[in-house]
Image (spheres, rainbow, N blue to C red):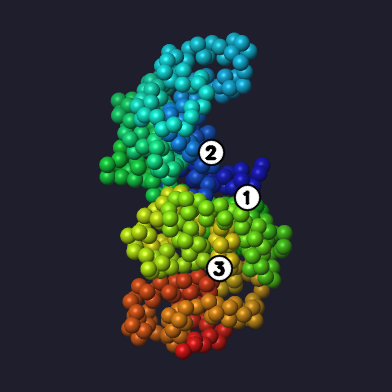
Amino acid sequence: MSVWDRLTQARDPAVERIVQTVQEQSFAGLVGEADVGKSALLEAAVAGLSDEFTIVMLDLDGAWSPNRLAWRWARELTRAVIGTVALSHLDALSPEMWPASTRSALLGLPGQLGREVAALAEAPVPPRGVGKPDVLDGPVQATRRLAEEKPLLLVLDHLEAPRAAGLGSPDVAELLWRVRSGGQYTPNLQLLVCTRPPAQDLAAGPDAAYRLDGRWLTLDPPSPEAFSDATGADIALCRLVHARTGGHPRATVELLEELQREGQHVRDPDSLIGAMAERHSDLARRYMQHARSVHRLGAHLLLAIAQGLGPYEATPEIAASEIAPAMTRLHLNGLVRRTGPREWASADPRVAWALGAGRGYKLTQAAHHGSSTPLAPPDSDRENASLHHLSGELTTSQRRILEQLANGRTNAEIADTLGLSLSTVKGHLHNVYRQLGVENRRQAAAVLDRGGFVASS
């Protein structure tokens, strides 16, 4: 069993929660940030429901047009009726070589799905032409017809993909209304959707088809315990790495494997992350290209976020009304994730390592949240060197704020003394906390005191 299979298995409680929700609700929605393993959990849950439902599973990622989506839908309906083996005969063999069972199944297909959908399923992949939304009526009606015979679960994965793709893609909000109107008198038809937070309004917004219906489940990244079960790594080590990667599955597993090979007491874990950042420079380049393609400010904002800066603080010369839609586009495309109000991080920590030279992801002793097994032995000389390096990167405002903090001033007193707004002071301190690898002003003051920090005048 691969580490990814073990990781999914370790998240069985989440899978059971999805299964139970589908069994109890006619509509169930799964929402989570990019790369938290939503699709793996979705597939595991669907496998557990296959005995109770006829499953029609549609991945909207790559459904560039109504034509392409209708074709995919027809194919999945066909799979549900004749089975995967017979569908593979349709793809791989010429008609004269089809087994008798496949011929018989295909002959009965028009009666079960309708002639239009049956013909569409046997047709080659359609071109990327836009097509008309009405082409989806046939698959919707065929889905309803199948649901009249046996409980049917329609699964829509990557609900955000058409909106992220832009002009010419299927209108998902309209699609959901078509499913609801076609199935409102068919109690055996149930819907399960999976998406990222910015696209949740497609199903549950003020004018959406399933507003106030069913139940939404938030899927979080795997827990440190799940990573420990999957990789065999020490739980204390998993907790530390999890805190640095945000639980991103691939980054966490990769870093855990590296640390296990090197040994848990690594003298210089930051250099290890630096080496990993170099390995992922091509991934970072692709992220930057993607960000640039989704919005003209995308690459600029992604770089700022990867370096631990807030998008609004990093670009004070750009109006917030212009930054907000850019962040929505980046979020929708899975390039960034929200970590709090007005707080963002790169969706993939490996990209942040590469673009931010490891800043914000340093595995320092100060960031070790209560673990009993330090990743690296305490090293006051290295802490002083890190503080000295940080001092060279601070802005004038940050230096002055840190000087006030070291003197025991509150945020309000700092703002009043320096003539800054309270939100500006908080924003600067938040960025400096990240660079120091601490969580609050008390920890920051302790690091500054140990390092003998002196702000320049």
SS at circle 3: loop
- Residue at x-position 36% and y-position 84%: 418
What residue is shown with label 3?
A: 359
Q: Nearer the viewer, residue 41 or 271?
A: 271
| Label disc, if present, on residue 44 of the rendered structure | 2
Instruction: Tell us which disc is closer to us: 3 or 1.
Output: 3
SS at circle 1: helix
Label count reads 3
What residue is shown with label 1?
A: 230
Q: Is residue 374 visible?
A: yes
Structural crowding at the residue carrying mark 3, measured as other residues with C-alpha within 10 Å and reported as few (<14), some (14–19) or many (≥20): many
Along the polypeptide, which appears first: circle 2 or circle 1?
A: 2
Three-letter code, disc 3: Arg
- Residue at x-position 56% and y-position 52%: 286
User: Residue 19: where, in percent of width, then height?
Assistant: 46, 38
Q: CA distance from mark 2 to mark 1?
A: 16 Å
SS at circle 2: helix
User: Residue 368: where, in percent of width, then height?
Assistant: 57, 69
| Label disc, if present, on residue 405 of the rendered structure | none
Three-letter code, disc 1: Ala
Structural crowding at the residue carrying mark 2, measured as other residues with C-alpha within 10 Å and reported as few (<14), some (14–19) or many (≥20): many
